[in-house]
Amino acid sequence: MNEIENIPELMADIGARARTAAAQLATASAERKHAALIGAAEAVWRCRAEIIDANAKDLEYGRDKGLSDAMMDRLMLDEERIRGMVDGLRSVAEQADPVGEIIAEWDQPTGLNIQRVRTPLGVIGVIYESRPNVTADAGALCLKAGNAVILRGGSESFHSSRAIHRCLQQGLRDAGMPEDAVQLVPTRDRAAVREMLTMTDTIDVIVPRGGKGLVGLVQREARVPVFAHLEGIVHIYIDADADPEKALKVVLNAKTRRTGICGAAECLLIHQDIAKTIGQGVIRALIDAGVEVRADTGLQDITGTVPAHETDWGQEYLDMIVAARSVPDVGAAMAHIGKYGSGHTDCILTENSQTAAKFLNGLDSAILMHNASTQFADGGEFGMGAEIGIATGKLHARGPVGATQLTSFKYIVRGDGTVRS
């Protein structure tokens, strides 16, 4: 099924079937959606050996393609990661159903009762690279929110995504739900991606999840609305009033736990008054952990650092590399983030509540953290069960995109023969 001659015809058929399924999903009961997700979770765990075998083919393909270590890490599945996928499916299943939730309700002097009610978006297209677990996360979140979804996984995760997709469809079948609710584009041909970006009649929103090249392409060429972030250029500012132990623990975790995720720290901003104390301790610990620290002139006298260049500011390394700069105060840190940041996630480490408030209120990143690792920039860690991505735009969804963020709303207006004068 990998070689398909007529991509436009294929995608038009997938889109039409997704639109039909979306109409059925819009009124599906919470119980039936719950059953489909639990069934999918059970199928994923039952078929874990098959999924790992499929993933081995993808890892071989990735090695042949020369994927970076970070990309290979994103691609790899083992039993622990499959357990995480299963837990995510179950967590999404157990959440409250957002569809039909009354967001607000009020009465007008005219006698009208007005409700703002959550409703599905319709059909969501998800285009992603490497991470095959996105197949499960995106499928689950879209289904929970009453949306049909068209999944287009990366060429490198082709076999893994298909194995996981079969489990999602098993859950749908067992729950008596339409299998077309979750469809996977059955080709590696990139023409399918370009086709999705123009399917305005059948796709309501596109969510790209991957590297800068993919997201940039989608944002440039999509005629369908997009939820996206281009890069995770994540900053941590260590304030003069930071706690040394917290700073050391948080920075090491934020940089080294997993370097290839979008919540990994990429730049340290260190208050100049603590550069030779807390700052030096943190930088030495990073170097001892195997991190290359590219430091500005204010920090270069710390043994083991290498000089930073202008190109290091605003860089997403996704590797064991971090840029470091000394700054005179929180205002200078905020100015640096404003110039070089990507609006994804930024953090302040301080025990001064006024300084923290200035940072948290003055910056406009999608996620702002105080004394916590930026690796928590994840929908699962926010209690959403999973996420379909992190949106850095300012319209509709922002930050981790969970099931609730995959809904819109409508107004229901009730009267009693009420007419306008």
Image: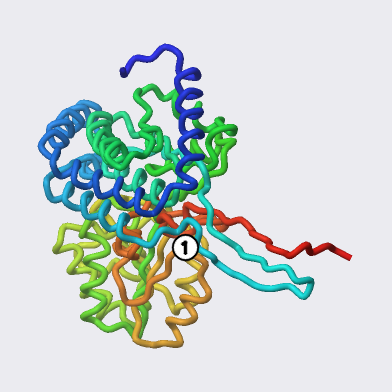
At x 30% / y 63%, what residue is drawn?
381
Which residue reaches farthest front? 417
Instruction: Using a 10 Å C-alpha cutoff, classify the residue at mark 1 as few (fewer than 14 neighbours), some (14 to 19) or many (20 or more).
Output: many
In the rendering, at what x and y percent does residue 345 appear? 41, 63
In the picture, measured across the screen, residue 289 lies left or right of residue 265, that is left
Q: Amino acid at mark 1?
A: Ala
- Report whether residue 297 is seen: no
Which residue reaches farthest right? 421
- Report whether residue 138 is seen: yes
Quadrant in the picture for the N terminus: top left
Which one is in front, 268 or 308?
A: 268
Q: Quadrant of residue 50?
A: top left
In the picture, measured across the screen, residue 93 lies left or right of residue 335, that is left
Circle 1 sits on which residue? 366
Which one is in front, 269 or 225?
A: 225
At x 60% / y 63%, what residue is drawn?
116
Which one is in front, 242 or 398?
A: 398
At x 40% / y 37%, what residue is drawn?
181
Q: How many marks?
A: 1
At x 17% / y 47%, what residue is drawn?
82
Quadrant in the picture for the C terminus: bottom right
Which secondary structure lies at badge 1? loop
In the picture, measured across the screen, residue 194 lies left or right of residue 377, that is right
Q: How is the rendered protein coloured?
A: rainbow
Q: Quadrant of residue 74?
A: top left
Tell me if residue 75 comes above or below residue 368 in the rendering. Answer: above
Which residue reaches farthest top? 5
In the rendering, at what x and y percent does residue 300 appear? 29, 66
In the rendering, at what x and y percent does residue 111 appear? 75, 71
